[in-house]
Image (spheres, grey):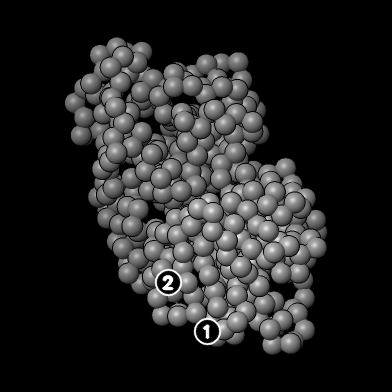
Amino acid sequence: MQDHHVVVVGGGFGGVQCANDLKGAPVRITMLDRRNHHLFQPLLYQVATTLLATSEIAWPIRNFFRDRPEVTTLLAEVVGVDSAAHEVLLKNGQKIHYDTLVLATGATHAYFGHDEWEPVAPGLKTLEDATTIRRRVLLAFEQAELETDPAVREALLTFVIVGAGPTGVELAGIISELARTTLPKEFRNIDTRKAKIILVEAGPRVLSAFAKDLSDYAQKELELLGVELHFGKPVTSCTAEGVMIGDSFVPCRTIVWAAGVEASPAAKWLGIPADRAGRAIVDKDLRAPGQEDIFIIGDTAAVMRDDGSPVPGIAPAAKQQGAYVAKVIKAKLAGRPAPGPFRYRHQGSLATIGKSAAIIDFGWLKLKGWLAWWVWGLAHIYFLIGVRWRIAVAWSWLWIYISRQHSARLITQRESIRED
């Protein structure tokens, strides 16, 4: 067992990459996460919309490191850091000493000061979120099949997604296809094709991070799918009865929040500056300011590029940061000069809009339509961990493409059906 103890908090893309790249270094590693699984978050919306099962996009963290005796994996929640004592504080009262600490604690959804909306408008960051949304979407159709009041039935068949970034666009597209393609033959009292899918964006267009021509294409594809688009007006209220869009009330029973993120409280733990989303402002080498032995990566960190623009909160960025921190740690332990400042290499932006439609922006190349959809699918399969899961996801997608039937439509942990 090595003497230098690296504690990695967070088993997401950044944390796992850092631990992987420390293989062979003279360190012992403790991996901490409050969940026992690593989640392939880019496909989380497909669990929420019945395309994939939870087991196809999440894997036990312990499984990754079963052949790494220097790695100890602990299921525990971190609630603070005592940097003076070099200790991580756990919720159960225990303390874990570290020589080097890597905080990769991620982010959650943000309600811009209205956390009371969360129970009726869940966000999408965890498997629990995805199964909650899937349950509510499926139950809405089941309840509508029972309902005799036309107004209540219409509200049950109205689905509002708040936020037109990639997650919101992908959710809207798949829910629309579910209602219009997969479910119509299965219900007798309702026509699922009449379901309303409403996508709300306070800004002027969908997918604002993409080039305007790609954004325009995505908007047209959503409209072809029957998605109603509302631009320029923020959501001002969310209740169990519906949502206020500006000054207009829309009766609905299913609301999904995809409008913003808030970083974990890592910056508060360390008492260092943070940006408006709570992300810790780090140095060029991803260290916490004034902390030689603490690194912050992924969605927890506000990392700036040389042109002053922020590094996006996406999986490739977190993986690059994790790999960079591993290099810094190994160089220090070997007595070598540290690598230069972190440099983010953008590998492209991707988003899908239902089946057979996607947009891709590699900077030097822009794709849209059917070809982009295939490239999007191949890219996501490539980044999945393990041959077994690549085959499983590829087979699920192929089956859905051929049969138009979603494979994960089980309602579990059922919420009570409304009697009103």
Q: Is residue 335 above or below residue 316?
A: below
Q: Residue at x 35, y 65 (%)?
A: 389
Q: Residues within 10 Å of mark 2 (few under 14, many from 20)?
A: some
Q: Nearer the viewer, residue 17 or 93?
A: 93
Read off the residue under disc 1: 1
Give the Cα distance between marks 1 and 2. Answer: 19 Å
Read off the residue under disc 2: 64
- In the picture, the quarter occupied by the C terminus is top left
Q: Residues within 10 Å of mark 1 (few under 14, many from 20)?
A: few
The type of residue carrying mark 1 is: Met
Where does residue 405 sit, x and y in percent of width and height? 26, 46
Q: Is residue 296 above or below residue 241?
A: below
Q: Earlier in the sequence, mark 1 or mark 2?
A: 1
Residue 355 appears in the picture as rendered? no
In which image quadrant can residue 133 be found? Answer: top left
Q: Nearer the viewer, residue 212 or 285?
A: 285
Q: Is residue 128 above or below residue 115?
A: below
- Is label 1 in contact with label 2 (beta carbons under 8 Å)? no
Q: Residue at x 58, y 68 (%)?
A: 7
Q: Residue at x 52, y 36 (%)?
A: 257
In which image quadrant can residue 395 be found? Answer: bottom left
